[in-house]
DNA sequence: ACAAAAGTGTTCAACCTACACCCATGG
DNA sequence: CCATGGGTGTAGGTTGAACACTTTTGT
């Protein structure tokens, strides 16, 4: 008897991953959606998904489908939740594990993504989604808000250099509420996670605002201490 | 072509659920562990687990194995995370979704559980666990702490009537740190979730302490407002 | 009498919120 | 010159942490 014989006779299931892909552009939080290429609901807007193979972890599967579609690797991903209602997918019994990913939107990946028939939608103006994907998005959004209240998420979503107003706009998009500019500045700078550069961005204001970047030490961003506290 | 034919050819996986079962007794947070009945690692201490069938959700599967082993139904359960390393189980490639459950420890279920070869262990004195079950426990513990900081978790873990000192001891066990009695009392009572009864418990103090129970309206405990804030 | 928990009150520091205010500059 | 965003400072309210203090009663 080989090791794998032990579980023979136990039920097996189709297991997929679905990715809620967040990006930030034009002061808006956006979601990358795809038009489904197979029945059922062919042509419907859907999250990026794919089956999990027997020789890969769920994290691998999620990174694989993300890479294949956007050409992006080393993307921050976080597990949201497994969805497993028996009838959630009319095409068959599929257990799906949802991840969310944070990616910066560049011109390059925009083009690649367009060729795949994918499209960026603002989170508060989404089309109807197939299956239970709307619920997946809602839960991913909550998880993102939770993370953003403990960690500064700019590193994953913004370009390398950014102004504090851009970071604040990002947070306003994530929490869907306006934040006081002065208070946000003080709170964020007190975390000592940002480094001010000797450059100014003058395209968004007359006076010009200093550019910042994240300090290099990546350990810092994992410390519990930082807690942004946007009061959900 | 039937609906289910669509996904034919896609990989299928063994999917299991594992339950981190929390209980509270003798001022300690405890975990219900089982001795594994099959190879590999037969006899090793393990979480309660079982395969997920093709005709049930993961939540159903978890409730099913819990009911079967403890005889308890309507138990609070919360999904923690999926574990899917290819080699996490030497017996085969099994994707496991972890839940944690909160159950009150009564005499009746203690006996039933004993007959199954299961045993309650204090969380800070656990035996070595099989596979990746230790990591599962750690993550479940963190998730429980998160929940306990937003919701009062006494309803699920304590008997119907309890003193504030018992509730505080529970929180001390969950957060593994001492809490100021006066401050805890004020914070908890300010939530207006507890109702004082005209009875006193004199077995644990000379003076006697009032017994409390949760107010009946269950919606209240789901409101976001309550936030206990034990500062993790 | 004393120990031990019950229950209440007070103080201090930290922090969030809401502003007021000046600065710089492109139109 | 004025509207706009940049950037700094301040006053008020809330909350948590620490701790003092009184009450009650079994031993």
Image (tube, coloured by chain):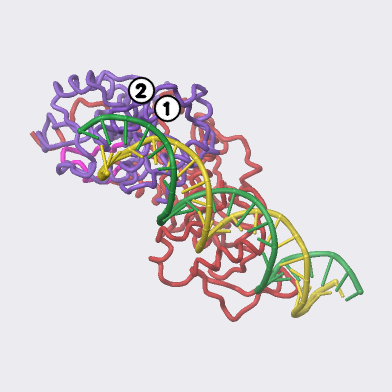
Chain colours: A red, B purple, C yellow, D green
Mark 1 crowdedness (10 Å alpha carbons): few <14, some 14-19, many ≥20: many
Please tell me in which quadrant of the rendered image residue A211 appears. Answer: bottom right
* Prevailing SS of the magenta stretch: loop
Please identify, in this view, whether the residue under mark 1 or under mark 2 is nearer the observer: 1
Residue A145 at x, y percent in the picture? 53, 48
- Cα separation, mark 1 vs mark 2, equals 38 Å
Residue at (27% x, 36% y) in the render: B27
Please determine whether, in this image, residue A231 is positioned above or below residue A186.
Answer: above
Please tell me in which quadrant of the rendered image residue B123 appears. Answer: top left
Protein chain holding label 1: B
Q: Nearer the viewer, residue C18 or A201?
A: C18
**Residue B103 within the magenta-colored segment of the rendering:** no
Residue A22 at x, y percent in the picture? 54, 51
Check residue A225 in the rendering and tell me which mark sits there, or answer none.
Answer: none
In terms of secondary structure, where does tag 1 sit?
strand
Residue at (22% x, 21% y) in the render: B107
Residue sticking out furthest to the left: A1
Q: Nearer the viewer, residue B61 or B27?
A: B27
Q: Nearer the viewer, residue B4 or B52?
A: B52
Mark 2 crowdedness (10 Å alpha carbons): few <14, some 14-19, many ≥20: some
Please determine whether, in this image, residue A213 is positioned above or below residue B187.
Answer: below
Residue, disc 1: B212
Image: magenta residue range: B83-97
Residue, disc 2: B56
Residue B74 at x, y percent in the picture? 37, 21
* Quarter of the rendering occupied by the N terminus of chain B: top left
Protein chain holding label 2: B
Residue A106 at x, y percent in the picture? 57, 62
Please tell me in which quadrant of the rendered image residue D11 appears. Answer: bottom right
Residue at (66% x, 64% y) in the render: A182
Could you tell whether A24 is left or right of B79 in the image?
Answer: right
In terms of secondary structure, where does tag 2 sit?
loop
């Amino acid at each position: 008897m080989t090791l794998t014989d032990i579980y023979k006779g136990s039920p097996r299931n189709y297991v997929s991953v679905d990715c809620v892909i967040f990006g930030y552009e034009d002061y808006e939080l956006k979601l990358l959606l795809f038009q489904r290429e197979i029945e059922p609901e062919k042509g419907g807007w859907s999250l990026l998904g794919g089956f999990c193979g027997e020789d890969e972890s769920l994290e691998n599967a999620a990174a694989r489908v993300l890479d294949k579609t956007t050409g992006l690797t080393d993307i921050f991903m976080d597990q949201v939740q497994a969805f497993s209602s028996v009838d959630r997918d009319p095409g068959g019994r599929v257990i799906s594990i949802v991840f969310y990913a944070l990616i910066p939107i560049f011109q390059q990946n925009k083009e690649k993504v367009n060729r795949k028939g994918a499209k960026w939608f603002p989170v508060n103006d989404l089309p109807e989604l197939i299956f239970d994907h709307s619920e997946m998005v809602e839960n991913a959004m909550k998880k993102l808000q939770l993370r953003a209240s403990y960690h500064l998420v700019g590193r994953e979503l913004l370009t390398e250099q950014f102004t504090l107003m851009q970071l604040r706009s990002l947070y306003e998009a994530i929490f869907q509420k306006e934040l006081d500019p002065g208070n946000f500045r003080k709170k964020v700078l007190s975390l000592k996670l940002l480094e001010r550069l000797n450059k100014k961005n003058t395209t968004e204001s007359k006076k010009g605002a200093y550019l910042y970047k994240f300090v290099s030490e990546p350990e810092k961003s994992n410390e519990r201490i930082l807690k942004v506290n946007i009061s959900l």
